[in-house]
Image (spheres, rainbow, N blue to C red):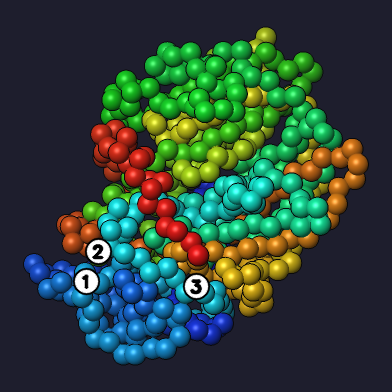
Amino acid sequence: MHRAYRLLLLRALLLFGGAISVDACVIFHGVKVEPIRRSTDSVTVRSPVKAHLLDGSTVVFRRGVTIVSGAVRGAGARYNLVLADTTAVQSVPLDSVVGMESFRDYVRTGETIVVSTLATGVVTLGTALLAKAIFGSCPTIYADSAGTRILQAETYSSSIAPLFEARDVDRLRLTARADGQVRLEIRNEAAETHYTNHLGLLDIRHAPGELAFPDAAGQLVVVRAPLAPASAVDRAGRDVRRVLSEADDAVFRTDPRTLAGVRADDLEDHIDLTFARPTGADSAALTLRLRNSLLNTVLLYDGMLGERGARALDWIGVDLERIGPAVQLGAWYAGRMGLRVDVLDGARWRTVTRLRDAGPIAWRDVAAVIPVPPGDSLRVRLSFVADNWRIDRVALAAAIRRPDARSIPIARLLDAAGTADTTALASVRDADHRYLQTSPGQRFTAVFEAGEVARGEARTFFLESQGYYIEWIRPGWIASGRDTAAFEPSDAALFTALRRWRVAQDSFERRFASTRIPTR
């Protein structure tokens, strides 16, 4: 089945329920779906695999590998630090491997894709860093502010395989430079490979008193004078209005009593919000500033990948290339994770929209356009898996409009040395069959010519991005993984992740930021 068709089919269903190369063009060959084979002392992986080594080189095993007696064995080609010279290898010691990843290696008519890589090599990663590397997962976006790089966004954080490639729209908190340029630094600071398909800028011009947000579907909305809730009470009965009224360091997190009380058949927390009913309005915009906790990172690293060890390579490289398993995982994740917005309509709560997971790294500003039923007040419930969110601010705006957005294409792409890379630029200019691949420790700068703004006008920029990433399977996971079955999405698996998160969250949060991989 043509990949573009499969991707469209997967997205439609969810609405209702690369290889290393020194050239620009990579031809992919067919992968046969076969179960992993394991004996008491070996594991065989059928998916094409890249093994990233401590010295910065990469070994590509196009026919899979067998992991036995502390070694990774197979017919491989070893590329040096800058992905240039190659030599044939048959085996590499497992303790020389930083991480392993599945990659797509198939050819069918119309499915050849183009992958370009930055000219700069990857950072050489030491064992001490990788032993505790938990930072991720997705590209991180920075902008300069008086000589300091300020985090702006993280993109396509839930796109863990090619069929989950997604479009993101992220509100940026920056202004154009004096010359009218907007410059964004895109970094890979995690043990994963990023495949970026598209980068673009959206420009909204509006009155100084207005604010602009993306909604749940990535469409833009402009609001005026959002007001804090009259009351806000969580499931534990806590008054959390003050915590949610301002964008500050005081943020909502699930009460420990609620987290301790979760069960496999009762996983949720909620916040009940009450607002004065907007006069004369039949709809309003609920604006939120939020990000995820690290619960979904625990679910990915432990439940989906770590416990399965080398089996996770075939889960990503084979299982999730098939529509059935991909739809099953995607529908479960979309339905269970994220944040559900309900409105009290008469005597019942009615679900009006759902916000998808935003990622645990950067704060995300988003709006949910909701109906305003008859009544003296507007009551809204936010429901979510316990402790899956950190919420900084919630407000309601009755004055809303849909703006016209100006699309600004990327003008230049600069590598880490500041040199323009025209091949990489072509890879991200449009959402098409071309991708820019970046490895841990790499960064580049996207330059947009935004122009000047008229006097008396305000403007807000949004980054429009599309892509996916492939997580590196750590040697520690391979050594300790005992579950040879593919991950089965279920509330039982989520409950297991919640129990682990409840016990380890403090140490996990401390380790997270400290394992950010330095870029160069």
Residue visible at 45% across and 48% down in the picture: 331
Q: Amino acid at mark 2?
A: Pro
Residue visible at 51% across and 70% down in the picture: 437
Identify the residue position indicated by label 2 in the image. Answer: 475
Does 289 appear above or below 100?
Answer: above
- Secondary structure of residue under mark 2: helix
Residue 458 point in image, percent of width and height: 82, 40
**Marked residue nearer the N-terminal end (3 or 1):** 3
Find residue 459 and report its image quarter.
Answer: top right
Identify the residue position indicated by label 3 in the image. Answer: 1
Q: Is residue 30 left or right of residue 458?
A: left
- Nearer to us of marks 3 and 1 is 1
Does 183 appear above or below 5?
Answer: above
**Marked residue nearer the N-terminal end (1 or 2):** 1
- Secondary structure of residue under mark 3: loop
- Tag 1 and tag 2, C-beta contact below 8 Å: yes
- Tag 2 and tag 3, C-beta contact below 8 Å: no
Q: Is residue 86 left or right of residue 112?
A: left
